[in-house]
Amino acid sequence: MKKCLIVVDFQNDFIDGALGFDGAIDIKNNIVKKVERFHREKQDVLFTLDTHTDAYLKSEEGQNLPVIHCVKGTFGHLLQQDVKDATKEKDLFFEKPTFPSLELGNYLLDKDYDEIELCGLVSNICVISNAVIAKAAQPNAHIVVDALATASFDKELHEKALDVMEGLHIEVRNR
């Protein structure tokens, strides 16, 4: 079975930086274990990185979320260290200027995955939008989100996002 793990935006600014929140770091060990397992099984591991410039506040997203974060070249943009330590040279990274990654979707188009699993931050924004991108790019793949390896700053929105993903035929594990 050909599988892929997508770790969404597990970056310093979402953990203890500009948009950090209680509970974000709590999913770290689950993510590290997943990355290590996918590597052991010789499966693909992909990462998305929320990536902005100093002009962020002038962007559509910046107009609606006026908190400068994940500026390329800053500590906040970096992958959380323990997750970074689990990466391998063959892993792929997709920098994205907004919630979903069209580049990730285009990459997935010519793949033939049986299962794509997503985890990371933030469940009701970037995780859900990239799960939809994966579903569109790989309509025959089984898409999975692990509830123990994703989180949100808003527990109610987190649960609603998981509900919506289930409605989109995305399996939510460990709920």
Image (spheres, rainbow, N blue to C red):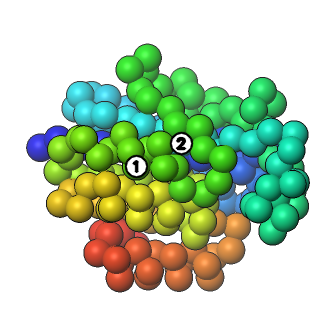
Alpha-carbon neighbours of circle 1 within 10 Å: few (<14), some, or many (≥20)?
A: some
Q: Quadrant of residue 65?
A: bottom right
Q: In the rendered image, is residue 28 in sight?
A: no
Classify the position of the C terminus by image quarter.
Answer: bottom left
**Residue occupying the far left of the picture:** 1
Q: Are marks 1 and 2 in contact (CB under 8 Å)?
A: no
Alpha-carbon neighbours of circle 2 within 10 Å: few (<14), some, or many (≥20)?
A: many
Residue plotted at (29% across, 75% down): 169
Q: Position of residue 96 (x, y in %)?
A: 60, 44
Q: For the residue labelled by badge 1, is the local secondary structure a helix, a strand or a loop? A: helix
Out of 172 and 2, give the one closest to the viewer: 2
The residue carrying mark 1 is 105
Total numbered badges shown on the rendered structure: 2
Q: Quadrant of residue 80?
A: top right
Residue plotted at (40% across, 74% down): 165
Classify the position of the N terminus by image quarter.
Answer: top left
**Residue occupying the far top of the picture:** 89
Q: In the rendered image, is residue 160 in sight?
A: yes
Q: Position of residue 89 (x, y in %)?
A: 43, 17
Residue plotted at (75% across, 32% down): 72
Alpha carbons under labels 1 and 2: distance apart: 11 Å
The residue carrying mark 2 is 48
Residue plotted at (40% across, 49% down): 105
Q: Quadrant of residue 137?
A: bottom left
Out of 130 and 6, give the one closest to the viewer: 130
Q: Position of residue 55 (x, y in %)?
A: 86, 44
Q: Amino acid at mark 1?
A: Gly
Q: Examine the rendered structure and indicate whether residue 75 appears above or below residue 62.
A: above
- Which tag, 1 or 2, sits closer to the chain's start? 2
Out of 147 and 92, give the one closest to the viewer: 92
